[in-house]
Every structure is written in C-alpha cells, then in structure tokens.
Image (spheres, grey):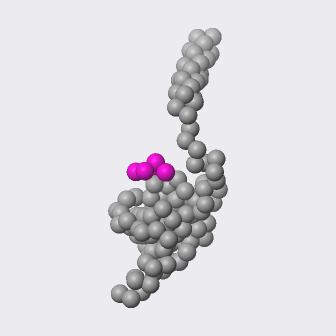
C-alpha cells in the first residue's frame, strides 16, 4: 500500500469514508449520472460508478443527503472511479441566506400558487 500513503500525503485535508449517493450533473444541466461517494473531504471526493462511464473534466456534484451541490474538476480516473477536487466557491456563495428572506420567499411562492389556482377557477367558470 505505498501508493495509498503517497496519495494521502499529497492531500490538504483528510478524507472521511462515506457511502452516500451522489449525482453528476453536466451538459448545461441536461445530463445526469448516479454515483456513490466513497470518501469526502473539504477539498474533494472519490466517486464510484456502476460501470465505466464518460464524465467531463468539470461538472456539478449534487449530494442529496447533504442537500449540497458543488462544482468539481477531475484530478484522476480509472475504470469505475474518479477522484475530484472541489472548485473554489465564490465568496457570495459562502454567505448564509438570511432567514427572513427564506420565509418571505416561501410566503410569496404560496401566494403565487394561490393566484394560479384562482386563475384556473376563473377561466374554467367562464
């Protein structure tokens, strides 16, 4: 296992073993592939696919369990595994969304749905 030792020394942060589902999103969000995330760190992840697949070097990785989506770029690949590094996040993405804005957005979405339902009622009654 000398290779594993060398690889771990090159990493900036320790990776934690995981077994969570992920989704690779690419082609202007038109194409998706399911994968399994086998390890994860602040800087990157190891993705495993059920078979050898063609994945672009830059893509979005969505982790439904964490409700998190990150842009990643491929660092290495073999037949069914891809090692990726997370692209640097923009500063504005790191700022949390204020709770009052989230509540206002939800309220406006509910009002919008109610108005759409009212329009359907009025057009069906005419």
Q: Is residue 96 visible?
A: yes
Q: Is residue 120 above or below residue 74?
A: above
Q: Residue 45: percent from the left, percent from the top?
A: 46, 67
Q: Is residue 49 visible?
A: no
Choose between 115 and 62: the one closer to the eye.
62
Q: Residue 80: percent from the left, percent from the top?
A: 44, 75
Relative placement, left or right, of 27 versus 22 is: right
Q: Quadrant of the N terminus?
A: bottom left
The verdict on residue 117 being magenta is no
Relative placement, left or right, of 31 versus 50 is: right
Q: Residue 35: percent from the left, percent from the top?
A: 44, 63
Extreme residue toward the top, this view: 126
For image coordinates 48% across by 74% down, the residue present is 11
Q: Quadrant of the C terminus?
A: top right
The verdict on residue 67 being magenta is yes
Choose between 126 and 60: the one closer to the eye.
60
For image coordinates 58% across by 44% down, the residue present is 95
Q: Is residue 56 above or below residue 77?
A: above
For image coordinates 64% across by 47% down, the residue present is 92
Choose between 81 and 85: the one closer to the eye.
85
The residue segment tinted magenta is: 64-68
For image coordinates 54% across by 28% down, the residue present is 100
Q: Is residue 21 above or below residue 118?
A: below
Choose between 30 and 9: the one closer to the eye.
9
Q: Residue 64: percent from the left, percent from the top?
A: 44, 51
């Amino acid at each position: 296992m000398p290779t594993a030792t060398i690889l771990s020394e090159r990493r900036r942060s320790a990776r934690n073993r995981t077994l969570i589902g992920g989704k690779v999103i690419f082609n202007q969000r038109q194409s998706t592939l399911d994968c399994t995330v086998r390890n994860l760190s602040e800087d990157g992840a190891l993705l495993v696919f059920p078979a050898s697949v063609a994945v672009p070097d830059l893509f979005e990785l969505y982790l439904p369990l964490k409700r998190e989506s990150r842009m990643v770029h491929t660092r290495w690949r073999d037949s069914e595994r891809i090692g990726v590094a997370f692209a640097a996040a923009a500063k504005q993405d790191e700022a949390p969304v204020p709770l009052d804005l989230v509540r206002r957005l939800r309220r406006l979405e509910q009002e919008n749905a109610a108005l759409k339902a009212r329009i359907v009622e009025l057009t069906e009654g005419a």
